[in-house]
Amino acid sequence: MPSEKILAAKKQVVSDLAAAYKDASTFVFVSARGLTVEQDTQLRNAFRAADVKYSVVKNTTLRLVFKELGIEGVDDYFTGPTAVAYSTDVVAPAKIAAKFASDFEPLEIKGGVIEGKIADKAEIEALAKVPDKETLYSQVVYGLLFPFTKLAMLVKAVAEKAEEEGGAVAAAPEASAEEAPAVEEAAAPAPEAEAVPAEANAEA
């Protein structure tokens, strides 16, 4: 029978893991048995670069940890060697695990937990196909801005059309203004022609 010291140490491990896991959005459980040292190093480096925590944990410990977290139904995944990848990023653990499971045959996804809900292998693989955070944000931002961009394009087109039509309308009055002096000049001699007889009559 384990001593109280050993039991206390195990309890502390469970407590520490539960504290580390409590803020995670996604957990992915994998079997990494058979990976070479080089493959395991590449996998760990990829997780680390994406700020995803990854470690091999005893199944008995994992059962206690998830029980403490209040997440039930995961015990079936805890058979054979089990490694856990988890992060506050919903997509990253699944995306990296799926990529390396495709590249390295010994690596196998068992299942996981997504936002507190149990997920099987197919659901983890489906999550892995979701765009990463940066791509998703850019798509969302573009989707939000597109109506305004389209509106701006329409306004610009209308303004340009109005400017073209305004130029055509403005040209007509300018032509009339040029013709007006010619009309006045043609009409001007008429009063002078009538003035001569008037002076002659006055002298008479």
Image (spheres, grey):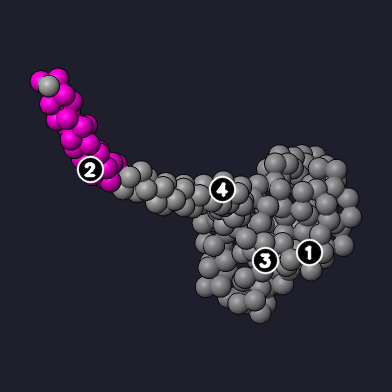
Q: Nearer the viewer, residue 150 or 112?
A: 150
Is residue 199 something one can see in this rendering?
no
- What residue is disc 4 on? 151
Q: Residue at x 59, y 55 (%)?
A: 139
How far is the residue under mark 2 from the one under mark 3? 85 Å
Q: Residues within 10 Å of mark 2 (few under 14, many from 20)?
A: few
How far is the residue under mark 1 from the one under mark 2? 92 Å
Please state if 199 lies on the left or on the right of 22 as rendered: left
Q: Are marks 4 and 2 in contact (CB under 8 Å)?
A: no
- What residue is disc 2 on? 186
Label 1 amino acid? Answer: Glu
- What residue is disc 1 on? 123
Label 2 amino acid? Answer: Ala
Q: Relative to residue 99, is residue 139 depicted above or below?
A: above
> Does the segment drawn in magenta span residue 111?
no
Query: Considering only order in the chain, which callout, 4 or 1, is on the residue closer to the N terminus?
Result: 1
How far is the residue under mark 3 from the one under mark 1? 10 Å
Q: Nearer the viewer, residue 29 or 36?
A: 29
Query: Considering only order in the chain, which callout, 2 or 4, is on the residue closer to the N terminus?
Result: 4
What is the magenta range? 177-203
How far is the residue under mark 1 from the one under mark 4? 39 Å
Q: Residue at x 83, y 56 (%)?
A: 118
Q: Residues within 10 Å of mark 3 (few under 14, many from 20)?
A: few
Between label 2 and label 3, give the one nearer the viewer. 2
**Residue 168 place in picture, x, y as percent:** 39, 51
